[in-house]
Image (cartoon, rainbow, N blue to C red):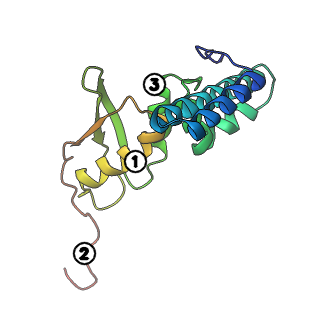
Amino acid sequence: MSAPTTARPVTAEQTGRRIEEVLDRLATSGDGAAAAEDLVRSLMDLYGTALAHVVELLGSTPGKALARLLDDDLVASLLVLHDLHPEDRDTRIARALDGVRDHRLEVVGFEEHSGTLRLRARAGGGCGCGSGTDAARAAETALAALAPEVRAVDVETAPAGPTLLQIGTAPTGAR
């Protein structure tokens, strides 16, 4: 479980100097939008590099610290944002769908070119009349932070099973 490295490793000192330069430019320049974008990029570089070190350190030590961080939605979404999440796309999709409690969903396929995740509502629990729209919305919400590769969700309803008949004894005196 090794973490990928960021494209531009930076030190805190380098980033601090860069942020000061950008803040000075913001104060004296009329080009605030470009300076603000540069500031955000510098901060993202710093956070990304720091997170890469955290993942590397935790991944190299025995124990469950990294697994606990991956279970935290906020930390996991930051790792995805910085392309540092050690799990592959399919594992992250499965992790996100495990969090969708009101709908039992299974992955049918993922279309790379469109970013569409096809799901099937599994038979089981509830009244069996689940809403595909509700399931899609719940899945999209769960996937947003962990699998940004998924741009659309298509939920198909599982085929209806055979009708079950109630078999029991006749009421007393009905014979």
Q: Residues within 10 Å of mark 2 (few under 14, many from 20)?
A: few
Is 17 above or below relative to 29?
A: above
Residue 159 drawn at (x, y percent): 19, 42
Q: Residues within 10 Å of mark 3 (few under 14, many from 20)?
A: some
Quadrant (top left/top right/bottom left/bottom right) for the C terminus: bottom left
**Residue 104 is at least partly visible in this image:** no
Residue on which the image places disc 2 = 170
Q: Which residue lies at the image location 73% right of the left edge and 23% below the top edge?
A: 53
Left or right side of 72 for 133: left
Q: Earlier in the sequence, mark 3 or mark 1?
A: 3
Tag on residue 89? 3
Left or right side of 135 for 44: right
Q: For the image shown, how many numbered marks are present on the structure?
A: 3
Separation of disc 2 and disc 1 at Cα? Answer: 49 Å
Q: Which residue lies at the image location 44% right of the left edge and 33% below the top edge?
A: 147
Closest to the observer: 36 or 96? 36
Closest to the observer: 8 or 6? 8
Type of amino acid under label 2: Ala
Tags 2 and 1 touching, CB below 8 Å? no
Separation of disc 3 and disc 1 at Cα? Answer: 16 Å
Separation of disc 2 and disc 3 at Cα? Answer: 55 Å
Classify residue 24 by image quadrant. top right
Type of amino acid under label 3: Arg
Tag on residue 141? 1
Left or right side of 121 for 56: right
